[in-house]
Each structure stands twice: as structure tokens, then as C-alpha cells.
């Protein structure tokens, strides 16, 4: 198991305090060394803010490009590999393409579901679809790796693009690359129940080591420890593939019947494991980051609807999904409405990171010269037609399922 990221959550204002960022960068470097000395491979250190909250009006939003480029320069100089600016409000969304064009390590998001009310924001959904559509030509479609639409995603999630600060004191959290543990758990199990029990044990053993280092860091440096997002995130090799574990459980290629049940088994193991949770703590199904999922996409075994269906029992939504380059704003918005509606009804965090690829159609091969991507294939997407009545929706109130509302009330009581 590797650490995908040590993410430091901090307040950042347009009047960037480079000395403060230098201190956070120094902490991230110390944390990296501490975890490496404990035997973990640390892939990246990242800074996450809620930068858009300081730029709320149309006039202020126009300052975004200067703000983003300055923040990127300072953070990169202090050793952070990636920077999450957080969720952009409706005034800032139209300026995000300019931000992405001017930067290379900045990530940003948009809330599709009002975090306070659980209401689907139709304008935000359509605005997010417009961002995806406008930045599709950038970097041959790769730029959409840096943008995600969020639904009910709380602050403190250490995975980018979803990471953003809660406005409180600085904190840090750990994002894991733990799909290999699922492969290990399935490789020597007698049955699915045995695989689940073995995975719970592996997660708890690794989490205990992560927490031990984190608590020492928090005490020594005065930062809050926000927990671990122990998601089963993959790396594009077969032995570190979520797809490998899913197929061991179902006995069939991903996409066949049994995939949903296999996904539920793996996610249930994460739910049962005892450790300080942060973020998603689920099963991630990033199509282009997983060797087996990417291969099944190239074979035509995956589609957007099935990926979202599996997210209902396990995952984080739609992630690094390669789509036809001519996908219209309306087609993209329909997908985002589906993600937002599922999140609102199930009261669970979901994201959508859609990647239309210029010049490509369904079934075309996909290749990027990027260490975290495997070769895959473009998934089909029905791009015809307008939005229908959803295209006119402003605030769409979808009540959560009764059992989820009951649990919410119990938690509040």
C-alpha cells in the first residue's frame, strides 16, 4: 500500500502569504520523510484551500487567473506538487477555463448539490458542464483531469480535485493507494466472506501505522490530523488494480453481472475497518487509472450508466471517464444531473471527472504519456438532443430515501 498524497488543508487569501505557505511546505516535507522512514512510499504532497470563498462577486472573480498563477508559483517553489483551489461559485465558474489555461498544477471543482440543503443546483450543473466542454480542447483533453463536479462532498477529503479546506485551522489528511490490499485479500481467500474479513484486517493494520505517524506529527507541529481516506484507489498495474480484485470476486470481466456485488463486498470492508475516516473511504473506479478497467473500456465492456450504478453501492462517482470529443454541453449536463440526483437521493458524496477527448469517438483507443494512466478506450455517450425540462431547472429538491433521512436524524439527535 502506498500513500497517494499527504494533503495539507490551509486558509489562503488573495493576498498570498508566501512565508505561511513556506511553513506548510516545510511541514509537508517533514511528513513525507516521517512516512518514508516508517516504510511507506509517498507519491505526492498537495495543498488544498477554499480559495474561491475569498472571491465572491463578479468583479473579484476576474482576479482569479492572477491569484491562481501566483498561488501555483509559490506552492511549487515550496515543494507541493499539486494545488487544490476548492469549489468555485457560480460567478467564478466562467473564469475557470482561463485559470486552467494559465496553470499546470492547479485543480478546482464546483458544487452541484447545495451542501447545506442537499438541493441539486441546476445552474451549477449546467455551469460545470460548460467548464468541461470549454476545456476539452486543452492538452488534448487531459486538462479535464484537473476539474471535477462535486455532489455532497465535504471538506477535508485528501484526494484531488475534491480536496478543499473547511475554513478552520490548518490540518492534514492522508489519501491512500490501497487497491493492492484488495488484490492481496482476494488472492488467498476461500470465498467472498473470507476476502472481506482479510481486507478489513489488512486495512486496519496499515491504518494503525499511518495513524501512529500522523499523531506524532500533529502533536509536534500543531496541525489537526483530519484522518485517512482509505479508498481502494488503483495504480495502472494489474497487481494494484481494483479491476483485478473485482474479477477475482465475480469470476467474470468487469462489466458482467456480479460486478456490483463484488464492488459492494470491497466497500463494505472499508466501512467495517476501524480507523479515523476522512473523505470518501470507498472503492474508486477511475477508468483510466486502473489497468483492468481501462482494458475493459477498450473492449467495450463498460458504459457510463453502469459505472454510476456501481457508485450507488460503493464508489466515488465517475472518475477519469474517457468520452467522445464531440460530447455536447447538454449531454455532459445530463450525466452530471444523474450524478447529482443519485447523490441527493442516497445522501452520499459523489464526483464526476469527465474527459471528452478531441477527435475521438466511442471505441477509439486512448493513450496518455502519464504515469498514472493506462491505455484504454473511449466510452459511448448519447450526445443528441437538448436538456428537456432539466435544462430549465434551477433548484431541484430531491428528498433523500427514507432510511437515509432516518439515519441523518438519528445522527443529529
Image: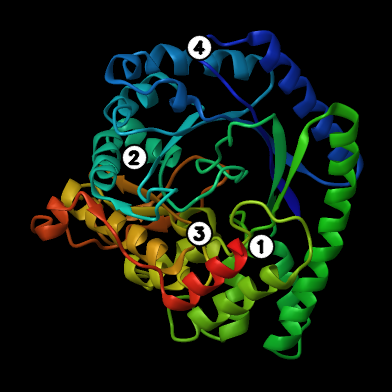
Q: Nearer the viewer, residue 396 or 10?
A: 396
Left or right side of 63 for 236 = right
Left or right side of 26 for 362 = left
Please identify the quarter of the rendering in which residue 10 is found. top right
Q: CA distance from mark 1 to mark 4?
A: 36 Å
Which of marks 3 and 4 precedes in the sequence? 4
In the rendered view, tell whether residue 109 sits above or below residue 78: below
Please identify the quarter of the rendering in which residue 321 is found. bottom left
Which of marks 4 and 1 precedes in the sequence? 4
Characterize the local packing of mark 1: few (<14), some (14-19) or many (20 or more) Cα atoms within 10 angstroms.
many
Position in image of residue 388 (x %, y %) = 10, 59
Q: CA distance from mark 1 to mark 2?
A: 26 Å
Query: According to the image, label 1 marks what residue?
Result: 179
Check disc 1 and report its element: helix, strand or loop. helix
Q: CA distance from mark 2 to mark 4?
A: 24 Å
Q: Nearer the viewer, residue 92 or 66?
A: 92
Q: CA distance from mark 4 to mark 3?
A: 31 Å
Amino acid at each position: 500500500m502506498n500513500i497517494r498524497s499527504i494533503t495539507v488543508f490551509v486558509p489562503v487569501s488573495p493576498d498570498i502569504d508566501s512565508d505561511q505557505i513556506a511553513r506548510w511546505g516545510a511541514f509537508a516535507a517533514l511528513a513525507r520523510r516521517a512516512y518514508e522512514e516508517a516504510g511507506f512510499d509517498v507519491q505526492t504532497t498537495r495543498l488544498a484551500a477554499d480559495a474561491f470563498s475569498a472571491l465572491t462577486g463578479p468583479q473579484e472573480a476576474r482576479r482569479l487567473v492572477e491569484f491562481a498563477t501566483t498561488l501555483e508559483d509559490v506552492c511549487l517553489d515550496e515543494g507541493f506538487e499539486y494545488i487544490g483551489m476548492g469549489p468555485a461559485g457560480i460567478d467564478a465558474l466562467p473564469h475557470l477555463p482561463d485559470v486552467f489555461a494559465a496553470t499546470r498544477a492547479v485543480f478546482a471543482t464546483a458544487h452541484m448539490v447545495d451542501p447545506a440543503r442537499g438541493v441539486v443546483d441546476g445552474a451549477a450543473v449546467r455551469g460545470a458542464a460548460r467548464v468541461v466542454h470549454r476545456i476539452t480542447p486543452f492538452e488534448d483533453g487531459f486538462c479535464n483531469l484537473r476539474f471535477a463536479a462535486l455532489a455532497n462532498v465535504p471538506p477535508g477529503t485528501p484526494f484531488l480535485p475534491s480536496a478543499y479546506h473547511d475554513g478552520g485551522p490548518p490540518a492534514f489528511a492522508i489519501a491512500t493507494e490501497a487497491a493492492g490490499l484488495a488484490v492481496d485479500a482476494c488472492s488467498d481467500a476461500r470465498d467472498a466472506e473470507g476476502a472481506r474479513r482479510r481486507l478489513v484486517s489488512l486495512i486496519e493494520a496499515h491504518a494503525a501505522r499511518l495513524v501512529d505517524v500522523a499523531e506524532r506529527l500533529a502533536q509536534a507541529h500543531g496541525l489537526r490530523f483530519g484522518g485517512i481516506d482509505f479508498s481502494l484507489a488503483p495504480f495502472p498495474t494489474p497487481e494494484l488494480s481494483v479491476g483485478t480484485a473485482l474479477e477475482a470476486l465475480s469470476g467474470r470481466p468487469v462489466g458482467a453481472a456480479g460486478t456490483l456485488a463484488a464492488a459492494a463486498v470491497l466497500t463494505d470492508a472499508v466501512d467495517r475497518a476501524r480507523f479515523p475516516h476522512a473523505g470518501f473511504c470507498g472503492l474508486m473506479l477511475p477508468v483510466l487509472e486502473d489497468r483492468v478497467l481501462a482494458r475493459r473500456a477498450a473492449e467495450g465492456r463498460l458504459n457510463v450508466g453502469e459505472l454510476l450504478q456501481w457508485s450507488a453501492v460503493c464508489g466515488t462517482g465517475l472518475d477519469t471517464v474517457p468520452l467522445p470529443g464531440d460530447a455536447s454541453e447538454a449531454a455532459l449536463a445530463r450525466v452530471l444531473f444523474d450524478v447529482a440526483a443519485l447523490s441527493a437521493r442516497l445522501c452520499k458524496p459523489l464526483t464526476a471527472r469527465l474527459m471528452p477527448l478531441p477527435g475521438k469517438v466511442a471505441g477509439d483507443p486512448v493513450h496518455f504519456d502519464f504515469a498514472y494512466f493506462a491505455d484504454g478506450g473511449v466510452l459511448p455517450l448519447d450526445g443528441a438532443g437538448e436538456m428537456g425540462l432539466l435544462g430549465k431547472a434551477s433548484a431541484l429538491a430531491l428528498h433523500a430515501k427514507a432510511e437515509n433521512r432516518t439515519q441523518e436524524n438519528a445522527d443529529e439527535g
